[in-house]
Amino acid sequence: MTDPNPRSVSDMGALWVPFGVEFETQEGRFTFELWAVDLAHAQERLAELKATAKIYGEVHAQIRT
């Protein structure tokens, strides 16, 4: 069966979907996607992101699959 939401990813039976994350700085408002299986999972992943995020370098290219 074809997934009705082409922006979801099934991983070992769990359906992952994108959640929007927004933050503000003096330069403006920014958003990005955080993938999770539900809202509670997204909130857990955001807490982990806040606790462990770091800059690893400049992105020079993106590979789309």
Image (cartoon, grey):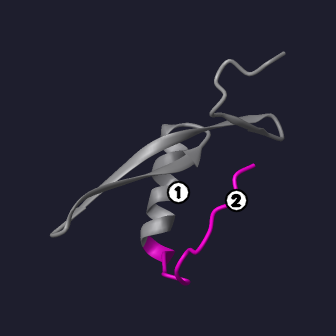
User: Looking at this view, is 30 or 41 the one in front?
Assistant: 30
Left or right of 58: which side holds 24? left
Name the amino acid type tagged 2: Ile
Q: Please, is residue 61 above or below residue 54 in the view?
A: above
Q: Please, is residue 4 above or below residue 40 in the view?
A: above
Q: Residue furthest left?
A: 26
Question: For the residue carrying disc 2, how many other residues have a C-alpha within 10 Å: few (<14), some (14-19), or many (20+)?
Answer: few
Q: Indicate yes or no whether the magenta region holds residue 10.
A: no
Q: Which residue carries the number 2 mark?
A: 63
Residue at x 49% of width, y 80% of height: 54
- Pointers 1 and 2 in contact (C-beta within 8 Å): no
Residue at x 64% of width, y 24% of height: 5
Q: Nearer the viewer, mark 1 or mark 2?
A: 2
Left or right of 58: which side holds 31? left
Left or right of 50: which side holds 15? right
Dividing the image into 4 quarters, which one contains the N terminus? top right
Label placed on residue 45: 1
**Element on which disc 1 rests:** helix
Residue at x 19% of width, y 68% of height: 27
Residue 11 placement (x, y as % from top left): 79, 42
